[in-house]
Image (tube, rainbow, N blue to C red):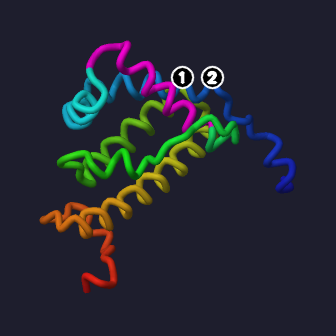
């Protein structure tokens, strides 16, 4: 099959795909023993507190996959001040995200979401490694990314 034919056979990601995935995903996050408390501390526990967050995240994914331009924000700036964030949080986030994708999306769309989410998670963790080094946070749970500012070496 030619590249053009292969590309045409993949259904595009839609707003409905994004909403279905995030609805399932965040329902699980809210109940998760590791992620739930982090989100509850920042967002709250009531549905009316979560609705704007989920819409904001839908805008994020829509911007990535559909180029809608609706998202405005800085994910790094939102994650950096969260106390106690570790790579384990990202691992769990990715696991639940993949599980929610498996439940709500076809395999090709799920793979596209998962690959993108993994790249974003790695980028955030690299940024957190820089942030923690800059803030002299010890131990730096993101040190495994071996990211340090040249002035700190």
Q: Residues within 10 Å of mark 2 (few under 14, many from 20)?
A: few
Seen from the viewer's position, the closer of residues 127 and 136 is 136
Which residue appears at 32% of the width and 59% of the height?
A: 128
Answer above or below: position of 149 versus 9. Answer: below
Residue at which label 1 appears: 20
Residue 65: percent from left, percent from top: 65, 41
Q: Let me know if residue 52 is in the magenta part.
A: yes
Q: Give yes or no for contact between labels 2 and 1 (Cβ–Cβ under 8 Å).
A: yes
- Rounded to the nearest angstrom, the CA distance separating label 2 from label 1 is 6 Å
Residue 33: percent from left, percent from top: 19, 32
Seen from the viewer's position, the closer of residues 8 and 117 is 117
Instruction: Give the magenta range.
Output: 45-62
Q: On residue 16, which mark appears?
A: 2
* Quadrant in the rendering for residue 126: bottom left
* Quadrant in the rendering for residue 27: top left
Residue 46: percent from left, percent from top: 30, 14
């Amino acid at each position: 099959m030619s590249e053009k034919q292969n590309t045409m056979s993949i259904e595009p990601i839609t707003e409905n795909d994004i909403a279905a995935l995030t609805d399932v995903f965040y329902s699980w996050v809210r109940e998760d023993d590791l992620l739930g408390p982090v989100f509850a501390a920042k967002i709250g526990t009531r549905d009316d507190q979560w609705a704007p967050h989920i819409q904001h995240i839908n805008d994020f994914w829509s911007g990535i996959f559909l180029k809608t331009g609706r998202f405005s924000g800085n994910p790094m700036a939102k994650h950096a001040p969260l106390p106690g964030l570790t790579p384990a949080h990202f691992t769990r986030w990715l696991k639940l995200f993949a599980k929610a994708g498996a439940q709500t999306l076809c395999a090709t769309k799920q793979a596209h979401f998962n690959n993108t989410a993994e790249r974003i998670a790695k980028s955030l963790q690299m940024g957190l490694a820089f942030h923690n080094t800059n803030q002299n946070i010890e131990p730096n749970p993101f040190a495994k990314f071996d990211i340090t500012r040249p002035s700190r070496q």
